[in-house]
Amino acid sequence: MTKAKKSSVASSSATPSRRDGEVLYWLFKSEPDVFSFDDLKRKGKKGEEWNGVRNYLARNNMRAMRLGDRGFFYHSNIGLEVVGICEVCKIAHPDSTTDDERWECVDVRAVCALPKPVKLADVKANPRLQKMSLVTSMRLSVQPVLAEEWEEVCRMGGLDPKTIRK
């Protein structure tokens, strides 16, 4: 199943570096009529391969991910909103949808839905998020998110990021 159409520092869309033990944050885009957050929730603890990504920067972002990294699940095209939290449950491995060894993906599983989905328009209107990759690199399907951006979007969605459980 393809999650994204072909096609760090979150303010630059460059793949971030990490300190030992540090959890990094990401944003995963999916068209909800192809694969929605509800679909991911139905996969349970096993999660789902985030396959079909054919952009080198997005692939490199997935290569930088570690188990337990958290991500926003963003419904693109329909809804245009952050709807849930997911986590990386399997590090980068060959994408099963292609024989081309250049393409890798991670597996993610649902953690929780946002009590209040966060619309793209609200992200763009928030001065604290003006440099977020979702605003500056709209087409990138797998994006880094800074810790400050993570906290702000969680707050906007009605979640305390410190209390999110697996």
Image: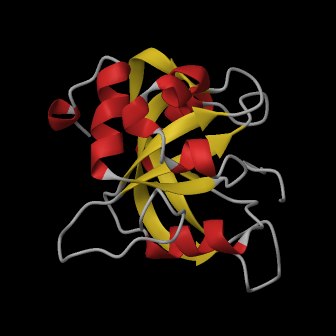
Question: Which residue is painted at 18% across and 77% down in the image?
Answer: 20
Quadrant hosting residue 143: bottom right
The answer to whether residue 12 is visible is yes
Q: Nearer the viewer, residue 26 or 48?
A: 26
64 left or right of 37 in image: left
Question: Which residue is painted at 45% across and 57% down in the image?
Answer: 10
Question: Which residue is painted at 68% across and 20% down in the image?
Answer: 79
Q: Nearer the viewer, residue 101 or 125?
A: 125
Quick check: 14 above or below 137? below
The answer to whether residue 104 is visible is no
Question: Can you say which quadrant of the picture contains the C terminus?
Answer: top left
Q: Nearer the viewer, residue 89 or 70?
A: 70
Residue that sits furthest to the front in the current view: 127
x and y percentages locating residue 100 in the rendered image = 82, 83
Residue that sits furthest to the top in the current view: 116
x and y percentages locating residue 113 in the rendered image = 42, 24
Quadrant hosting residue 127: top left
x and y percentages locating residue 39 in the rendered image = 62, 31
Quick check: 18 above or below 157? below
Quick check: 69 above or below 95? above
x and y percentages locating residue 149 in the rendered image = 35, 42
